[in-house]
Amino acid sequence: MTADQILAEIREANLSYLMLAQSLIRVDREQALYRLGVSEDTARLIGALTPAQMMKIAATNTLLCRFRMDDDIVWGLLANHGKAAANESVNRLHASILMAGRHQEAA
Amino acid sequence: MARNKSILTEARQIERAVTLIQLGARLQVLESETDLSYERLLRLYKEVAGKSPSKGQLPFSTDWFMTWQPNIHASLFLNIHEYLNKVSELDEIDVVIKAYQLYLEQTQSQALEPLLSVTRAWRLVKFVDNGMLTLTKCSCCGGHFVTHPYEIAKHYVCGMCNPPARAGKGKLAGGLQIPSAAGRVPAAAPAHAH
């Protein structure tokens, strides 16, 4: 990947993220807060963005969204480390419960 | 109870009632959460659901939430509910509706049977409000799970970190299953048989 390609792909990803986030927020604000894991203030900002603003914000060299499961327990459950894959639905539910319990990052 | 005369309020309540009926709520839930009269609710129910509402008492026991699989479903719903409660300022019943929709999505995406009905979910929130049930932190994974209020938090381990012996052995479609080979006792695994 050349530097130009990297920048172009990051811009694409950012733009998709912003567009998806905005439509989620417009469909149902509260459920969007849960899905996106952002604060109410952030949701208000994203919801009010114009297409031109979105293009501008998306054109940067860093990603706008961040990884949400940066701990061993949730990651292990989702990636099925050291456990049989048949256990998967239990593990995924377990991971969902753990992640749903983390509202401090959004509030 | 003073009937609400505002047409806008009534429209919102009807909308709410329709959503609840579509989610499969019992008539008692609608009666408790809206100011609409019983007769109107009954007509609305027949119109939306195309059948008469089921009769009889609501499930009243807190024990159902303690069994292994229902506890997982109830804990997932209640965690989503708490999340929405913390980040937004909605009416109590709207939080239940939105959290229940998110819970349904989650079970659908995993092809699981949604064990928790919207009526049970609503009851669960009432039980928690009344202090009959609560969320306790698992000392092993740190997640929050539905328990009786007197659970000793220090020693509590959830049903997923420590599944009971018969857990996940049911053959019902859409249920959770733990194959015995994947159990926590490595000696029982067939790989060691040789």
Image (tube, coloured by chain):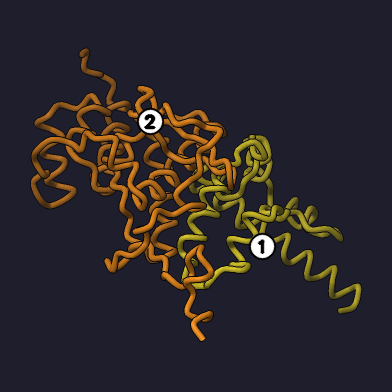
Chain colours: A yellow, B orange
**Which residue appears at 80% of the width and 55% of the height?**
A56
Q: Chain of mark 1?
A: A
- The quadrant of the image that shows the N terminus of chain B is top left
Looking at the rendered structure, the kind of residue marked 1 is Ser
Tell us which disc is closer to us: 1 or 2: 2
**Which residue appears at 38% of the width and 23% of the height?**
B131
Q: Which residue is mark 1?
A: A16
- C-alpha gap between disc 1 and disc 2: 42 Å
> Considering depth in this image, is B103 or A14 the residue closer to the camera?
B103
Q: Judging from the image, what secondary structure is the residue with disc 2 in?
A: loop
Q: Chain of mark 2?
A: B
**Which residue appears at 56% of the width and 48% of the height?**
A98
Q: Which residue is mark 2?
A: B133
Q: Are marks 1 and 2 on the same chain?
A: no
Q: Judging from the image, what secondary structure is the residue with disc 1 in?
A: helix
Q: Mark 2 packing: few (<14 Cα in 10 Å), some, or many (20+)? A: many
Q: Is residue B84 above or below residue B193?
A: above
Q: Mark 1 packing: few (<14 Cα in 10 Å), some, or many (20+)? A: some
Residue B46 percent across, percent down from the top left: 11, 46
